[in-house]
Image: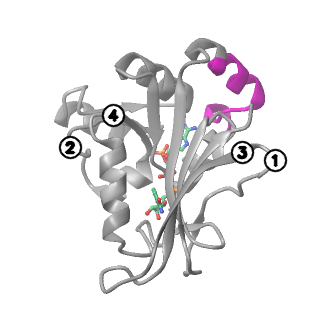
Amino acid sequence: MTELSLNPQKIDQLKQTLGTEFRIKLLVACDQKNGIGIDNGLPWHLPNDLKFFKQKTTQQVIVMGRNTYESIGKPLPNRCNIVVSSNLEFQKKIKETYVENACTVVSNLADAFVLASKKTTNQSVYVIGGGSIYHQTIDLATDLYVTQVETTVKADCFFPSIDMGMWDIKSTEPYTKDERHAYNFAFVHYTRRQ
Ligand SMILES: NC(=O)c1ccc[n+]([C@@H]2O[C@H](COP(=O)([O-])OP(=O)(O)OC[C@H]3O[C@@H](n4cnc5c(N)ncnc54)[C@H](OP(=O)(O)O)[C@@H]3O)[C@@H](O)[C@H]2O)c1
């Protein structure tokens, strides 16, 4: 994995390749200790968060790790799905099953973003997880869309800590728990400080 990961030098090269207009948006729901997943699934069911996710990502290019893809089980419809995996069997299976525009597997993150920059119609890509992908891409991200869930759940997968010296909060939209949502939560949009 190490040689496939994005180190600071690769991040600089990639930024140059993608250009300053290209936006890399991380989209995540996390608890108060940055927990995001357990047993390769989500630790909560928050219908309005799923709605927000769908609204943000429909007709967009999305990038995810193989575990996240497998937890969803199929490409998300009406989106250009790019999955990152070094697993040759998995690459072959997806290639045989789906047309390139619905789902493509690439073997490293740099290729994922270069492909995303070719597929996008609006110079942006959503990174939808999971933990390993968020850790590798936060330094490249321009935007974080974080659903901050007001609880601490049992988790085995985490979002990296957000260094508030690097980010501005652009908007916050709070929701109060109700019969369909067990926790209060807030949609917070961070943009990278210039
Ligand atoms: N709360 C949320 O918003 C949210 C969103 C998404 C996911 N999640 C949760 O996050 C968890 C999954 O996260 P995870 O960290 O276990 O897995 P992940 O990031 O989804 O996928 C990890 C896999 O992606 C591939 N990969 C990662 N970096 C790579 C690189 N640089 N080059 C090539 N391949 C690379 C590898 O696949 P190969 O082994 O095939 O090489 C690796 O095993 C689940 O619990 C899921 O429910 C939560």
Indicate the amino acid at tag 3: Trp
User: CB of mark 4 within 8 Å of CB of mark 3?
Assistant: no
Q: Earlier in the sequence, mark 2 or mark 1?
A: 2
CA separation in Å, label 2 and label 1: 37 Å
CA separation in Å, label 4 and label 1: 29 Å
Residue 115: percent from left, percent from top: 42, 21
Q: Earlier in the sequence, mark 4 or mark 2?
A: 4
User: CB of mark 3 within 8 Å of CB of mark 1?
Assistant: yes
CA separation in Å, label 4 and label 3: 24 Å
User: CB of mark 4 within 8 Å of CB of mark 2?
Assistant: no
Indicate the amino acid at tag 4: Gln
Q: Which residue is mark 4?
A: 60
Residue 20: percent from left, percent from top: 61, 17
Indicate the amino acid at tag 1: Gly
Q: Secondary structure at mark 2?
A: loop
Q: Earlier in the sequence, mark 4 or mark 1?
A: 4
Residue found at x 63% / y 66%: 34
- Mark closer to the observer (2, 3): 3
Q: Which residue is mark 3?
A: 167
CA separation in Å, label 4 and label 2: 10 Å
Q: Decide: is 158 above or below 190.
A: below
Residue 97: percent from left, percent from top: 18, 36
Crowd tier of the residue under label 3, counting other residues whose Cα lies within 10 Å: few below 14, some 14–19, many 20 or above:
some
User: CB of mark 2 within 8 Å of CB of mark 3?
Assistant: no
Per the image, is 5 magenta? Answer: yes
Marker disc for residue 165: 1
- Mark closer to the observer (4, 2): 4
Q: Secondary structure at mark 4?
A: loop
- For the C terminus, the quadrant is top right
- Magenta region: 1-15
CA separation in Å, label 3 and label 1: 6 Å
